[in-house]
Amino acid sequence: MIALGSEIEMGYDDVGVGLPVVLLHGFPHHRGLWAPQLGALVDRCRCIAPDLRGFGATVPSGPYSMDRYADDVAALLDRLGVERAVVGGLSMGGYVAFAFWRRHRARVRALLLADTRAGADDAAARGRRDQMIALVRDRGSGAVADAMITGMVGKTTRARNPEVVDAIHAMLEAAPVEGVVGALEALRDRPDSTPTLATIDVPTLVVVGEEDALTPPAEARAMHAAIAGSRLEVIPEAGHVSNVERPAAFNHVVSEFLGVLTYA
Ligand code: MLT
C-alpha cells in the first residue's frame, strides 16, 4: 500500500526490473487480473499493477472519473520514481489509458490497448449503467457478477475451462459496492476517445480476444486503423479477459512488443 497525498491509499504490485510497464485492470476487476502477466513478464520488465480507486486494496473515495483514475496512476508513478512507462489497460483500463494519454502523454513510452474500445456510451448503454447501479445497490456485487460473467468470458473458455470462469466470477463478486457504483458512473459519463486516436504517436499494441463479446474485434480493428503505426493481435479462442483466458498467447504478443521497445 502507498499513500497518494493525504487522500487515499493505493494497493499495487511492483515486480521485476527494467522497462516500467503499468497494467490497468478492467471493470469490476482488481490488480489480480494481471497475475498471469506479472509471473511471465517479471524477467524482462518492471510490472506495476495498481488497484484502481474503489477496487481491491485501494479505498473507495469519490467522485470517480477516468481522469481521476488516470491522475491516481500518475501520482503512483511519482511515488515510485517512475518518469515514463508503457501504459497498458484492459477494457475500462483502456479507457483510463486514453485519459492518461490525454493528461500525461509525456510519461507514456508506449500503449497496450487490450479488449477495449474508443467510443463513449450511447444513450442505451448509459441506461444500462443506471440499471446496473440500481442492481448493485439493491443486491450487491454478486448480482453484478452473475449478470456480467457470460459476456466477460469467451465461449471456448466457458466450455473448456470452468475454473477460469469461477475465478473471474469470484473477482467480480468481491468488488466493493461503492467502487462498483463509482466506476459505473465513470463508465457512463466517460468521454469519446475516438478523436484521441489520431493524436497517439507512440508505439501501440492493440490486442483482442477473437470471442470478445463486450468489446468485439471490430472495435479493435477500428482503433488499429485510426492509430498510425499500431499493431493488432487477435487471440484465438479467447473472450473479453483474453489475458487470463489465453495467458501464453497474450504474453507472447506482449513480450514481442516489449522486446522491440527494449532493444529499439
Ligand atoms: C470492463 O471489462 O472493463 C467493462 O466491460 C467495460 C465496459 O463495460 O465498458
Image (cartoon, helix red, strand yellow):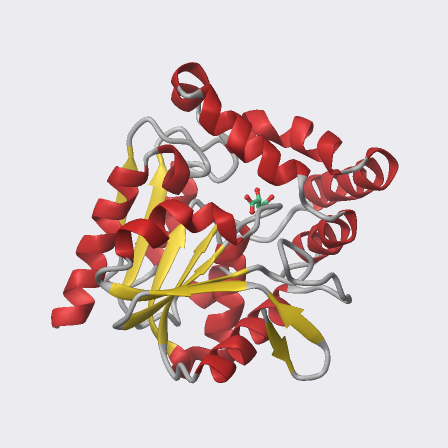
Note whether 90 is above or below 6 in the view shown.
above
Q: In which quarter of the image is the N terminus?
A: bottom right
Q: Locate residue 150 relative to residue 145 in the image: left or right.
A: left
Residue drawn 53% across and 34% down?
A: 168
Q: Residue at x 47, y 24 (%)?
A: 163
Q: Image height check: is 151 above or below 128? A: above
Q: Is residue 54 visible?
A: yes
Residue 37 rendering spot, x and y as whole percentages: 34, 50
Can you tell which quarter of the image residue 53 is in?
bottom right
Q: Quadrant of ligand 1?
A: top right
Above or below, comparing residue 144 to residue 129 in the picture: above
Image side of residue 145 versus residue 136, left or right: left
Q: Where is residue 124 in the image (x, y as percent from the top left)?
A: 71, 39
Q: Which residue lies furthest to the right in this view?
A: 138
| Residue 220 image offset from top left, x and y in percent | 38, 46
Q: How many labels does the image show?
A: 0
Residue 15: image quadrant is bottom left
Q: Quadrant of the C terminus?
A: bottom left
Q: On screen, 236 above or below 120?
A: above
Residue 231 visible within the image: no
Frontmost residue, 217 versus 66: 66
Q: What residue is drawn where x is 60% and y is 47%?
A: 27
Q: In the image, what residue occupies the spot 68% across and 28% down?
A: 147
Image coords of residue 260 (percent x, y): 15, 64
Q: Residue furthest toward the left? A: 263
